[in-house]
Amino acid sequence: MKFILGRKLNMSQIFDKEGLVQPVTLVEAVPMTVSQVKTKEIDGYTSVQVSSKKAKKETKKEFRIDAPTHKVGDTIDLSQFVAGDAVEVSAISKGKGFQGVVKRHGFGGGPRSHGQKHSEREPGSIGGGLRNKVPKKMRMAGRMGGDRITVKNLRVVHIDLGTNTLYISGAVPGRRGTLVEVTG
């Protein structure tokens, strides 16, 4: 299993061999060091813990794998990936603050006429009848974003080992500077 940690830089575009434009997300992935290897006999599961140190900030992350082939002190970098690899990217999505039901859940809102003065984007009825409380899991306004999102079936388009940059096709969750996990 291939894996690496990186920081989302920005979105861009790149031309492929046929001259078509490919939208890509640039992820800066500095080399990581294996700091701990967990085994099924001792810890109950197998995983590799890696750490990356950049700009006085140490980042640690644990990746669960079936059979660890790494040893403590090994370096993991972008050379394990090749263009065309299918990858899975996980990150924390952009926080959007408190949002109404139209933006958060895609409600249509009320009609724009027939006495509707200020309630075009209101949720409408939330219950009623014989119930005397709001049902559980009722979709309402609230905080949106800031969730862990995993995007599957993305492709590695290009790898720049000189700048430790990974070019991934399509959109990757999060804002610029978000910590991104790339597994393949």
Image (cartoon, rainbow, N blue to C red):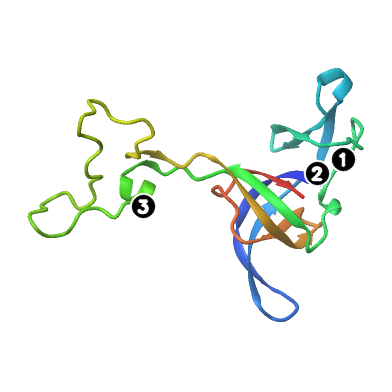
What residue is drawn where x is 68% and y is 58%? Answer: 154
Residue closer to the observer: 21 or 68? 68
Is residue 107 depicted above or below 130 in this figure? below
User: What element does badge 2 sit on?
Assistant: loop
Badge 1 vs badge 2, beta-carbon distance below 8 Å: yes
Residue at image location 68% in from the left, 53% down from the top = 27
In the structure shown, which secondary structural element does the residue marked by tag 3 occupy? loop
Q: Tag 1's secondary structure?
A: strand
Specify the quadrant of the image occupied by residue 144. Answer: top left
Considering depth in this image, is 53 or 45 the residue closer to the camera? 45
The amino acid type, in three-letter code, at marker 3 is Gly
Question: Taking 47 as reference, is 56 left or right?
Answer: left
Q: Amino acid at mark 2?
A: Pro
User: For mark 2, what is the residue?
Assistant: 31
From the image, tell me which residue sits under label 3.
Answer: 106
Say whether residue 73 is left or right of residue 102. right
Q: Position of residue 122 (x, y in %)?
A: 23, 46
Residue receiving disc 1: 75
**Distance CA(mark 2)–CA(mark 3):** 41 Å
Residue 117 visible? The answer is: yes
Count of numbered badges drawn on the protein = 3
